């Protein structure tokens, strides 16, 4: 397929590279000549010097034969309007185009949602999510819901470093009051069935079943440390 | 409070977003049509050109803010009858116009958009798009 990307920043270029490797045709519109040169020198002659809100630039980039437009600039107005131009054009032709846009300012999310753009990606939300996940030791992750049991799911709990290198006895924490633990995976990859006597160390993972309504409690225990009474 | 000031308080509200070259003349004529006018510009220095007397008696209300921010736009009176968006950039005006349409649902939204394609887009979004350049062209064509 042919994809028009608005904005040759880090995100635009990464997406373009990925699409090219997957065998697609790509054009990147950027208003900065140096950026365009960088793109042409590094990923192939796919840059179009111009403005995503200018129809001439969009046609130069091949919007009229394009399946998808991805707006990745840091300017929300450019992202919105380039997508709207594409949507208007595709309506005239009765030939749907997929529009994907970044939203940089979260306050505009609702407004973008009303605009008819196919997919809207909240930059802040995703950065925050990535950051929280990278700090997710200690943490609780959802693995899968249990079918027919809407309130229960399989989770993994990573033992926090507050526990100390020597570890604690699982039975001495109050974790087992809240979860049904099935497996301990240690940092070196060995697995064992949990009992009250099992020793868990920082970085170990406990695979367990629990219900959604007490997850917050478990999270809090992981952060504040249910182990402080130990050893 | 004197009679004139009472009268000013009850006037209908209009807003200009982007106080550029023709802003003053426009503000004046909208005042004359019977509106108080709120002027928002990202650069407070542009308010230096405003006539002091009108600012003092509340006929013109300057407000420093970014028209592309929902937060700043929401500082304008909710019951605006008219919003005129006239910053330097077409795409910015089209964007602010659409934001304003969502925030001030009963207001007429007028946007300066010189680019024809974007003007059509504005029309489709039920904005009143006008182009000083197109108007000038028409005028010139009518005399030659």
Image (tube, coloured by chain):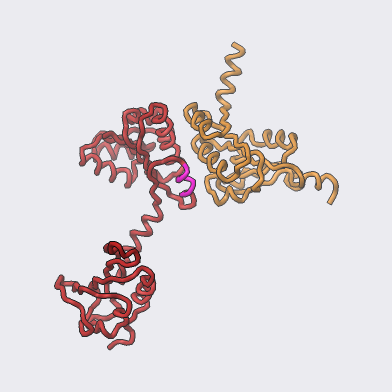
Chain colours: A red, B orange
As for residue A112 lying within the magenta part, the answer is yes
The quadrant of the image that shows the C terminus of chain A is: bottom left
> Residue placed at 56% from the left, 38% from the top?
B87
As drawn, A85 above or below A225: above
Q: Which x, y percent locates residue B119?
A: 51, 29
> What is the x, y in percent for residue A29?
35, 36
Residue farthest to the left? A190
Residue A190 colored magenta? no
In the displayed structure, would residue A139 be above or below residue A82? below
First to last magenta residue range: A109-114
Q: Position of residue A77 (x, y in %)?
A: 46, 41
Q: Residue at x 31, y 71 (%)?
A: A210
View extreme (top): residue = B144
Give the dominant element type of the magenta stretch: helix, strand or loop: helix
- Front-most of residues A149 and B133: A149
B95 left or right of A139 in image? right
Residue A136 position, x and y percent, is 31, 67
How many numbered tags mark residues here? 0
């Amino acid at each position: 397929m042919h994809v028009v990307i608005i904005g040759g920043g880090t995100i635009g270029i990464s997406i373009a590279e990925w699409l090219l490797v997957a065998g697609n045709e790509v054009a990147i519109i950027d208003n900065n000549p140096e950026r365009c040169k960088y793109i042409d020198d590094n990923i192939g002659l796919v840059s179009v010097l111009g403005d995503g809100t200018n129809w001439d630039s969009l046609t130069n980039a091949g919007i009229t034969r394009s399946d998808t437009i991805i707006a990745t600039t840091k300017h929300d107005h450019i992202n919105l309007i380039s997508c709207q131009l594409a949507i208007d054009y595709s309506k005239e032709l009765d030939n749907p185009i997929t529009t994907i846009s970044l939203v940089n300012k979260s306050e505009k999310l609702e407004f973008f949602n009303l605009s008819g753009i196919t997919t809207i990606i909240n930059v802040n939300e995703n950065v925050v999510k990535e950051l929280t996940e990278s700090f997710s030791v200690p943490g609780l992750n959802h693995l899968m819901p249990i079918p027919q049991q809407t309130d229960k799911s399989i989770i993994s709990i990573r033992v926090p470093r507050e526990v100390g290198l020597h570890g604690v006895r699982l039975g001495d924490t109050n974790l087992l009051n809240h979860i049904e633990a099935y497996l301990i995976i240690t940092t070196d990859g060995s697995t064992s069935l949990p009992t009250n006597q099992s020793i868990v160390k920082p970085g170990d993972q406990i695979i367990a079943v629990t219900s959604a309504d007490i997850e917050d409690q478990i999270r809090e225990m992981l952060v504040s440390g249910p182990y402080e009474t130990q050893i | 409070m004197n009679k004139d000031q009472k009268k000013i308080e009850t006037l209908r509200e209009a807003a200009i977003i982007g106080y550029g070259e023709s802003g003053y003349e426009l503000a004046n004529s909208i005042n004359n049509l019977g509106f108080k006018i709120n002027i928002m510009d990202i650069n407070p220095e542009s308010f230096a050109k405003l006539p002091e007397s009108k600012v003092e008696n509340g006929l013109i209300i300057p407000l420093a803010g970014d028209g592309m921010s929902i937060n700043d736009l929401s500082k304008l009176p909710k019951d605006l009858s008219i919003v005129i968006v006239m910053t330097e950039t077409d795409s910015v005006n089209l964007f602010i116009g659409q934001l304003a349409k969502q925030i001030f649902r009963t207001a007429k939204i007028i946007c300066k958009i010189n680019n024809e394609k974007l003007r059509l887009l504005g029309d489709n979004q039920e904005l009143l798009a006008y182009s000083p350049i197109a108007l000038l062209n028409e005028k010139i064509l009518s005399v030659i």
